[in-house]
């Protein structure tokens, strides 16, 4: 059986759906239950966490390369759009938001940020709404920064400025 060459290499930034942007530190071989397993060692600096993912399972778990500039541009369009809030119960919506955040799909994450964003003059967010909003915003910011110039502050400002620009209600 020919070994499939991995699409990821050390020093590549990748997106792991449940944790966001991480950097492959190395690829190592480890013996697990008598089998030799090749593993990606991924560091998530901000979370002070290291994750080992078997190279043959990377695609299956949804690990992917960073989004391209075209996807980032689509996200900006999504952020400029009108918030779509379903009339479902909060617990059901919260579950859907959580799934979108953990999907690793940047556009889905942008939808959560757009839908949960509150302008200063809007009603206060509940604690759980704010938690979901901040989690989605952080994922979006980290990937924007990794795709762009690596500066999370600039990426965060770009996102919040875009959200603020759409907050102006039509007269």
Image: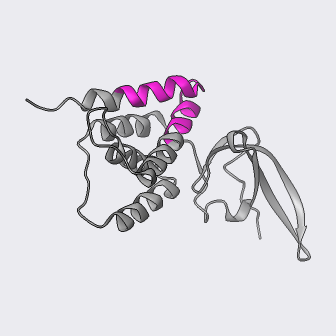
Residue 121 located left or right of residue 146? left
Which residue is found at the position 38% from the left and 49% from the top? 112
Query: Picture coordinates of residue 46 (x, y %)?
Result: 68, 39
Query: Picture coordinates of residue 69 (x, y %)?
Result: 46, 33
In-front residue for pair 61/137: 137
Predominant secondary structure in magenta? Answer: helix
Figure colour scheme: one colour
148, above or below 126, in the image: above
Q: Which image quadrant is residue 78 in? A: top left
Q: Where's the C terminus, which quadrant? A: top left
Which residue is found at the position 28% from the left and 26% from the top? 165
Q: Which image quadrant is residue 97 in? A: bottom left
Which residue is found at the position 89% from the left and 62% from the top? 30
Q: Where's the N terminus, which quadrant? A: bottom right
Residue 6 located left or right of residue 34? left
In the picture as drawn, the residue positioned furthest to the left comes out as 171
In-front residue for pair 140/73: 140
9, above or below 55, in the image: above
Which residue is found at the position 55% from the left and 31% from the top? 145
In the picture as drawn, the residue positioned furthest to the bottom comes out as 33
Magenta residues, start to end: 140-161
Q: How many labels does the image show?
A: 0
156, above or below 102, in the image: above
In magenta stretch: residue 36:
no
Query: Picture coordinates of residue 143 (x, y %)?
Result: 54, 38
In-front residue for pair 166/108: 166
In-front residue for pair 33/100: 100
Query: Picture coordinates of residue 4 (x, y %)?
Result: 71, 60
In magenta stretch: residue 144:
yes
């Amino acid at each position: 059986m020919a070994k499939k060459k991995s699409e990821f290499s050390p020093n590549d930034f990748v997106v792991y759906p449940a944790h966001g942007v991480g950097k492959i530190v190395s690829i190592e071989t480890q013996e697990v239950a008598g089998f030799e397993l090749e593993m990606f060692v991924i560091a998530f600096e901000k979370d002070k966490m290291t994750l080992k993912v078997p190279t043959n399972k990377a695609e299956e778990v949804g690990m992917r390369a960073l989004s391209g500039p075209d996807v980032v541009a689509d996200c900006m369009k999504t952020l400029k759009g009108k918030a779509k809030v379903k009339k479902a119960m909060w617990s059901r919506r919260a579950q859907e938001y959580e799934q979108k955040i953990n999907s690793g799909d940047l556009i889905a994450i942008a939808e959560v940020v757009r839908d949960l964003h509150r302008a200063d003059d809007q009603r206060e967010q509940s604690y759980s709404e704010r938690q979901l909003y901040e989690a989605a915003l952080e994922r979006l910011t980290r990937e924007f920064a990794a795709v762009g110039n690596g500066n999370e502050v600039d990426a965060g400002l770009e996102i919040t400025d875009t959200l603020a620009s759409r907050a102006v209600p039509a007269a």
